[in-house]
Amino acid sequence: MSGLVRTQRSTLLVSSISILVTLFVLPLGGHHLGPTTSYVPAVLATVACFDIMSVWLLAGEYLDTGDRRMLGMTLAYLWSLLLMGGYALAFPGVISSHPPLAVTSSVAPYLYIGWHAGFPALLGAAWAPWSYLGGIEHRPRAARLAAAMAGMCAAALLAVTGCVLFATRLPVLIQGLDTSGMAKVTAPVALPLVVASLLVCARAVRGRTGPERWSSVAILVCLCDLCLTYASRYRYSLGWYTGRTLTVAASAIVLIAMLASFRRLKATAEFNAAYDGLTGLANRRSAYDAATAMIARARRTGTPLSVVMFDLDRFKQINDGYGHAAGDEVLRCVASTMRATVRDSDLSARLGGEEFAMVLPDAGLQDARVVAERLRAQLRARTIPAIGSSVTASFGIAELQPADATAENLLHRADQAMYRAKALGRDQVADQPADRWAGELVTGLQPAR
């Protein structure tokens, strides 16, 4: 399944769950559950942690790529963090029973609307067409980021200060636990703004597979949160609590997607570091590491271990005559033939160019010869479409001996045996005596490949 299809299905699933939960709770939203002393502080602390991490990661993404949309998303999460801080200082029971910004009971609702409408609006603005006009930036990004974040902090401070200073002049949004005034005063502005942001963002992230794809889902969850808050009409009702739970989900969605993306990138990087990208076999570094571990096990258990190394004959002529694309296809066919020849416990590796190796635990020299001869015969018998013929290879085998101090010694003996096979006429299997090659770095002319 492609990354785009997988992401589309995931976002559709989460969006559907959010909508279904909202539709289920709406008829029951006014049911009073009673206040709790820890729920709102826990929600706000959790959202603050998510917002801080999101700001940090998105800012880093902007500094790495210069993509202005990442800067816009950074500012959206910074706005959420700052307005949420003002909300915490105005909501009774979070800081104290008489919070410092609670000039009137409506200060917290106004900050809540500024938080839950401003955050989606800024996310939508981040993905609006004008946000990426001019493409990727090449000017100093750190200064631009610092200036933008400072401006957002000033705007958030101005919004909080305005709510506090003009609290007595603004329409009343809440009386006691009755929040019906919120729907009458703010819904005509907040809901259309969030819906417009959702449409803009959903259109802009269509076809993308990165964490930014989830921005539209975060806006949708905010919309569900607002709908439940407006419909519940009372604080501490079922709809009110469900809305606050969706607040946590809205703040976490993009963060979770970013962390999942980093995990996939880490796994991909680790795979690329250990395996050859063309053939999917282990590369030289991981082959040496694995051979070292296998040798240690063989010595500990007293079991034999052998190495088979082979090199394709006259591979340069294939590249020169048919092109490098055909040469790559030859290497892939050789790799697939190797995998079909060896056991699951054996190690197959591409050491570089047209040189390959197999490490065979629990296999003596004669066992290695049988494997090498079988693979040699299969290569000769397999017609590769890219060149219209088969290929041959020269094989060298060596069995682990007490004189082999390291994996490099054993592999070196097999490598020298392979050159011996080439010197004897190619397309054959040869070995080297352990007492001649163990621990010795052989120099001098070697036959052409």
Image: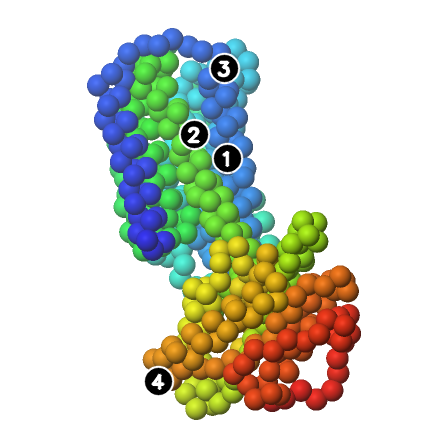
Disc 3 element:
loop
Q: Residue type at mark 1: give it.
A: Phe
**Residue tagged 1:** 50
Q: Between disc 2 and disc 4, whose residue precedes?
A: 2
Q: Which mark is residue 87?
A: none
Crowding at dot 2, Cα within 10 Å, few <14 / some 14-19 / many 20+, comes out as many
Asked whether disc 4 touches disc 3, contact meaning CB atoms under 8 Å apart, the reply is no
Q: Residue at x 64, y 75 (%)?
A: 431
Q: CA distance from mark 2 to mark 4?
A: 61 Å
Q: Residue type at mark 4: give it.
A: Gly
Asked whether disc 3 touches disc 2, contact meaning CB atoms under 8 Å apart, the reply is no
Q: CA distance from mark 4 to mark 3?
A: 74 Å
Q: Between disc 1 and disc 3, whose residue precedes?
A: 3
Point out residue 296 in the picture as x, y percentages from the top left corner: 69, 53
Residue 340 shows in the view:
yes
**Residue tagged 3:** 38
- In front: label 4 or label 1: 4
